[in-house]
Amino acid sequence: MQRTAARLGATGFALLVGLAALPACAADVALAGVLGGKALLVVAGGAPRALAPGESHLGVRLLSVGGDGALIEVDGAQRQLRLGAPVSVRATGGARRVVLSPDSQGHYLYQGHINGRTANLMVDTGASTVAMGSADAERLGIDFRKGRAVGVRTANGTAQGWHVKLDSVRLGGIEVYGVDAVVTPQPMPFILLGNSFLGEVRMTRDAQQMVLEKR
């Protein structure tokens, strides 16, 4: 990552009580409340998480929210949630596959998602982690200044960066959770997709194309 970086108003809140009894199963999802335009979801018996439409948490993507219900997507399947009525959802399994073609400079670019938000990504097998500039981190809602301070090499020497843990990184049907990343103080044209993500997928070449498959 260091080598590459060098070159380069809530209303209508309804809270459901008694969710502590929800079984801690990865297949269980419950709508705990509605906070303005956000849904408060409980996934696998964890802490409630407020999501806006388009955001994801632990493989559950919120599509829409309104009244006392929310529409979610898990593994391409849509399910309707209602307050007080947990649902059981399960991924179908099997490999996910993304095929990337190089641009005119030989770079493999893809518009993916980080923490449920759109991100312009560039595959970099020489980067040890996902790496991004502070402006991208702020746009993605990452509170990187609470991360662990690390030294990063820039064109002007060594500067302070921050090590953070991303909730999720998604390319097409491939989603990896708990991904290590480094935020640099300098701007970067793309978010580098390093081996903290690539190490979780199988990567092969088919002529000029790069094929990524979830393990």
Image: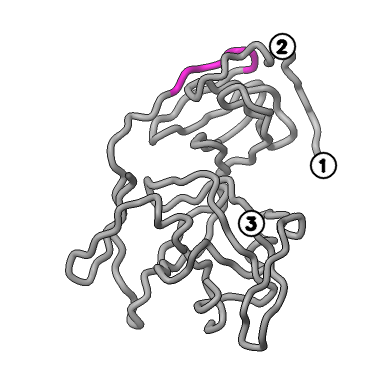
Seen as rendered, the residue at the extreme left is 207
Mark 2 neighbour density, 10 Å: few (under 14) some (14–19) many (20 or more): few
Magenta stretch, overall SS: loop
- Return the residue at label 3: 140
| Magenta extent | 83-89
Reading the chain from its start, which is encountered first: label 3 or label 1?
Answer: 1
| Residue located at (82% from left, 42% from top) | 9
Q: What is the quadrant of residue 48 in the picture?
A: top right
How far apart marks 1 and 2 lie (CA) works out to 26 Å
In the picture, the disc for residue 9 is 1
The type of residue carrying mark 1 is Gly
Q: Is residue 197 placed above or below 44 in the rendered structure?
A: below
**Would residue 208 be counted in the magenta stretch?**
no
Reading the chain from its start, which is encountered first: label 3 or label 2?
Answer: 2
Asked whether the residues under the numbered discs 1 and 2 touch, taking CB atoms below 8 Å apart as contact, a structural biologist would say no
How far apart marks 3 and 1 lie (CA) works out to 19 Å
Left/right placement of residue 139 relative to residue 213 reads right
Left/right placement of residue 208 relative to residue 24 reads left
| Residue located at (51% from left, 17% from top) | 87
Q: Position of residue 156 (x, y in %)?
A: 67, 88
Between label 3 and label 1, give the one nearer the viewer. Answer: 3
The type of residue carrying mark 2 is Gly
- Return the residue at label 2: 18
Q: Is residue 81 placed above or below 212 in the rendered structure?
A: above
Disc 3 element: loop
| Residue located at (57% from left, 35% from top) | 64
Q: Is residue 150 placed above or below 144 in the rendered structure?
A: below
Asked whether the residues under the numbered discs 3 and 1 touch, taking CB atoms below 8 Å apart as contact, a structural biologist would say no
Reading the chain from its start, which is encountered first: label 1 or label 2?
Answer: 1
Mark 3 neighbour density, 10 Å: few (under 14) some (14–19) many (20 or more): some
Disc 1 element: loop
Mark 1 neighbour density, 10 Å: few (under 14) some (14–19) many (20 or more): few
